[in-house]
Image (cartoon, helix red, strand yellow):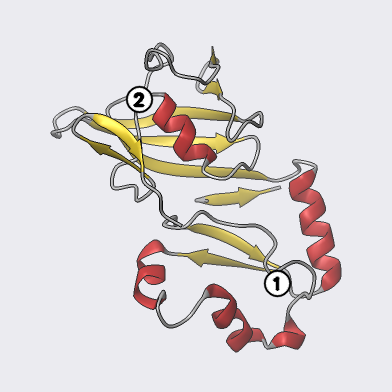
Amino acid sequence: FVCVYVCVCLCECVKNSMTLCDALLAAYSEQGLSKLGEYPGIVHRLDRGTSGVMTIAKTDLAHTLLVSCFFSRKTSKTYQALVSGTPTPRTPLEAGSPVANTLINTRTNTLVSIPVDGYPARSMWRVIEAFPSVSPVASLVQVMPMEGRKHQVRVHLDALSSPMLLDPIYSISGGRRSRRRDGAKSLSS
């Protein structure tokens, strides 16, 4: 297998001309990538507008083993996000919010457990650095999702009243968070 760093700025530059699959096929040819799954070689997804590491399977055996590792949670993913404000374990959800919230404070990380699209989803998070002198206040946050739900990190940060800054999916407009209808920092095992 091979790991590829996908940069959001690179994706924006080439989005009209070449997809990641096109680039992989050009680099490895169809014979050099796994044929399992919907797209050649692709083992897992990365949200649109997100930079991160993706694993690419060059053989069907590698694809099967990697998918098994993700499914059995033998891999861990860690994301970093620049967020609005500074999330705290006591940050309340908005009144009338339909999501159930569990916050558990450990020594260095906090667990947020909020369903995503009706499915259980948990993420550990911690503030790496706060920038109180910036207007508006911002923080660099590390998030480790324990499941792999679509938009999980975005949903959890939004529920903590600290949505990602400049996020094309969840944005702040007029002090309210609103979901726009648009179509890993590291990986270890």
Seen as rendered, the residue at the extreme right is 61
Q: Which quadrant does the N terminus fall into?
A: bottom right
Give residue 175's position: percent from left, percent from top. 21, 29
Q: Which residue is mark 2?
A: 161
Give residue 113's position: percent from left, percent from top. 58, 23
Res. 55 image quadrant? bottom right
Q: Which residue is mark 1?
A: 41
Q: Is residue 5 left or right of residue 60?
A: left
Q: Is residue 163 left or right of residue 135?
A: right
Give residue 131's position: percent from left, percent from top. 22, 32
The foreground one among 105 and 179 is: 179
Secondary structure type for disc 1: loop
CA–CA distance between discs 2 and 1?
Answer: 37 Å
The foreground one among 172 and 24 is: 172
Neighbour tally class for label 2: few under 14, some 14-19, many 20 plus, Cα within 10 Å: many
Residue at figure coordinates x 44%, y 18% from the top left: 97
Residue 14 seen in the figure:
yes
